[in-house]
Image: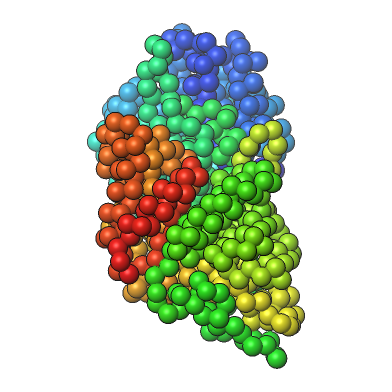
Amino acid sequence: MRNYLETLKRHPLILDGAMGTVIYDKGVFVNACYEELSLTQPKLIAGIHRGYVEAGAQLILTNTFGANRIKLRGFGLADRTEEINRAAVKLAREAAGPDIMVGGDVGPCQEGGGKLAQSREKEVEAAFAGQMAALADAGADMLFLETFSDAYELQVAARAARATGLPVHASITVNERGETATGLAAATLMEQLEADPNVDTVGLNCAVGPAGLLKIAQTLIKRVSKPMLVKPNAGFPQQVGGRMLYMTSPEYFTEKAKEFIRIGVRGVGGCCGTTAEHIRVMARAISCLSEFKMPVVERVTVESVVAAPQVEVVPMDKKSPFGAKLARGERVSSVELLSPRAPDMTDMLAKARLCQEAGVDAINIPDGPRATARVSPLVAAMLIRQAGLEIEPIPHYCCRDRNLLGMQSDVLGAAAAGIRNLLVITGDPPKVSGAAEVRGVFDVDSIGLTQLIQGLNHGLDMAHAPLVPPTAILIGVGANPCVLDLDHEIDRFYRKIEAGAEYAITQPVYDADALLRFLDRVDKGAPRRIPIIAGMFPLVSLKNAEFMRNEVPGVVIPDAVMERMAACGDRESARAAGVEMAHEVMARIADRVAGFEVSAPLGNVRIALRVLEGAPPA
């Protein structure tokens, strides 16, 4: 038996996307009754459902948003209400199969977000009751009340829904100010739903894009104990070629979906403008989060880690030159270079040599950024050493692609090859890059892997068996001072420190105040102080800024920075502005950080060196 409420307890739920948007894209004009299409064009509706199921949706909604007697009356179809709703459930159920849940979709009876007059309560409740009874009798697993803005009408709808005995979800629609069309604050309405015994789960949908809805959800989720689901629009529509199109990309939509899950939302789907492609990309990312396993290594604090007998733990200043410099409190510098997609390392080695000649301390090597396949950062680090370069390589190591056994093997291999410094990250969820589909492993996250390496440094492997001699890996971790949910990020950062982190590198910083707020919080509550290195990524064009802002996970670029890049007239002025803004941020934060890590934008290492050359004196 498919159980909606039990499923929400196990993992975040992947909902489907828009029905009306796709119907319109298929050439059906908006003056048609879309709900009637379940009778007149069943293959069209079934195909839309199948598209969402194949994309990875775990709950699909019937084509019945306006299939109540009052709405259907305007099309002369009131007497076919039961027939339309039953047909819609049948089509959805056939597409869903035995495992995917079907929600009976119910929208308001009132037009345009109006208020329900008390004199119409019985008529409206009867309309809801007729529709919902048909949906329940036809086999819907739950009832999904959505796009409501009037508290009174939603209360009436929820009462009718409860009478069916099915689980009831109630979703409201608000503007970017967090207000309904009837002028009610979303917080007030959400608190009413929290207290309503006829409502099992609550949510937000429509009207607002993913970024706007995320801000609202972050505030509201703290006010309710009932599970929350969201279905944002794909941004705001724009007129293109005479048609209104939604421009939010599936990748950007997905990054926001991950943020919803991280703040505690239990299910994400899409409303107006979203398609099967939005759900497909999102489902891959969310499935990684929903299958995320807690670290299998025991969570312990650094102080409670006891070295195995006959093991001498190597201190931070003895692990590597980079670690020694951090231990002395001296400012460090690093340049981030991507390893190549092909096995020719000539260009990367040449860039590393330039950095060494410029006096840079280290080269950071990302591990499959944005889930793309490149030469292994561990191998790239080994080749830098084999080339005779003295600059210290810092390969990133992410948890996405290997199980715990493979991770331990890689760390031991890195130690055997002379690699003494790893930056531990969880990793971006995989997505399609070419023809192949891949899935993330995520046996542990960066906290769990930090614990594992800390154990190896203390002479204990993942099974707590003695390891002699121990590894001597300097453990770096990531930090993101600009996330929406700073409390969550701070908590994770503290846990990384407890797990054994010895230094941190932040995501690229474009807002000095955000970093300073993060550092203030860390200074007050961290279990112990570790050096924090500020990440910098000098922008080179408006297009580059837009890509970073919308497509790169964890990067937050303020509007003021975007406006400054937009004002640049040519490539050179844009590059100069990017370097200048980096210098401005560095000047604000120089006395609070242990150094700077600068990415080479689009592989241009000379721009990264220009940024470091203009850093404030240590």
Tell whether 194 sits left or right of 587: right
Q: Is residue 61 above or below residue 511?
A: above
In this orientation, which residue lies closer to the viewer: 573 or 115?
573
Q: Residue at x 40, y 74 (%)?
A: 330
Q: Residue at x 57, y 18 (%)?
A: 84
Q: At which x and y percent is residue 43?
A: 65, 15
Q: At which x and y percent is residue 181?
A: 29, 31
Q: Tell me if residue 193 can be seen.
A: no
In this orientation, which residue lies closer to the viewer: 287 or 66?
287
Q: Tell me if residue 65 can be seen.
A: yes
Q: Residue at x 53, y 52 (%)?
A: 351
Tell me the quarter of the image containing the C terminus.
Answer: bottom left
Q: How many marks?
A: 0
Tell me the quarter of the image containing the N terminus.
Answer: top right
Q: At which x and y percent is residue 350?
A: 56, 51
Which quadrant of the structure image shows residue 146? top left
Which quadrant of the structure image shows residue 365? bottom right
Q: Is residue 139 above or below residue 73?
A: below
Residue lying furthest left in this view? 183
State the scheme by which the image is colored: rainbow
In this orientation, which residue lies closer to the viewer: 116 or 453?
453
Q: At which x and y percent is residue 244?
A: 40, 18
Q: Residue at x 48, y 42 (%)?
A: 602
Q: Is residue 202 above or below residue 297?
A: above
In this orientation, which residue lies closer to the viewer: 567 or 188?
567
Tell whether 333 sits left or right of 448: left
